[in-house]
Amino acid sequence: MMLVAYFEIRPILYLAGIPIVCLLGWLVASALGRPVRLRYGLAIWAIYSGLFLFFFHGPFIGRESQASFDMRWTIAESPSMGQKQAEVILTFVDYPDHQVGEFSDQLANYLRQRADQVLPVTFTITRDYGRMRGFRLAQVGDFTGWQSSFGYSASSGSGLPSPW
């Protein structure tokens, strides 16, 4: 069984917030000595929903951008992690402690035809509130659209700055 790496919690937060907002509305109405009315409840719910959508589904969530880095490529002698396709290892030139691996025969064949060991690699980066949520390889050299069975990122120990 495979565990889900990214669990969508926003619907649960929204539903959990409805009784809290209703309770707050009731407390405010009681403190002001006003009767609780349906139209006030609907107005509070509409404001809550609008603010929730703005902050949790709005312009700050899922922002995608592209970044290119010069990377050095190698192809592992034999694939690791039980994969059958060739393992391509891309190491950042400016951040040598950080690597990205991709298991793809198509990408490996493309790289074997190239004479240069360093080439530009473009990533699509997804950010929430300015913080990176994830990335994916978009282009290696001038090659796009390869099939891959698995990919990973790795870093090794020195604590130098990250490319992200």
Image (cartoon, rainbow, N blue to C red):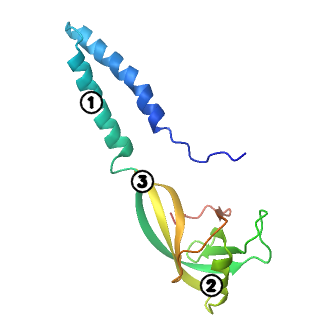
State the SS at label 3.
loop
Percent from the top left, x then y, of residue 139?
A: 51, 76
Question: Residue flagged by tag 3: what amino acid is it?
Answer: Gly
Q: Pointer 1: residues within 10 angstroms few (<14), some, or many (20+)? A: few
Percent from the top left, x then y, of residue 140?
A: 55, 78
- Residue visible at 23% across and 25% down in the picture: 43
Residue ID for mark 2: 110
Report the mark closest to the observer, 3 or 2: 2
Q: Which mark is residue 62?
A: 3
Q: Earlier in the sequence, mark 1 or mark 2?
A: 1
- Above or below residue 121? Residue 65 is above
- Above or below residue 42? Residue 150 is below
Badge count: 3
- Residue visible at 33% across and 47% down in the picture: 58
Q: Earlier in the sequence, mark 1 or mark 3?
A: 1
Percent from the top left, x then y, of residue 68?
A: 47, 74
Question: Residue flagged by tag 1: what amino acid is it?
Answer: Ala
Q: Pointer 2: residues within 10 angstroms few (<14), some, or many (20+)? A: some
Q: Are marks 1 and 3 in contact (CB under 8 Å)?
A: no
Relative to the observer, which residue lies in front, 106 or 153? 106
Residue ID for mark 1: 46
Q: Are marks 3 and 2 in contact (CB under 8 Å)?
A: no
Q: How far is the residue under mark 1 from the one under mark 3?
A: 24 Å
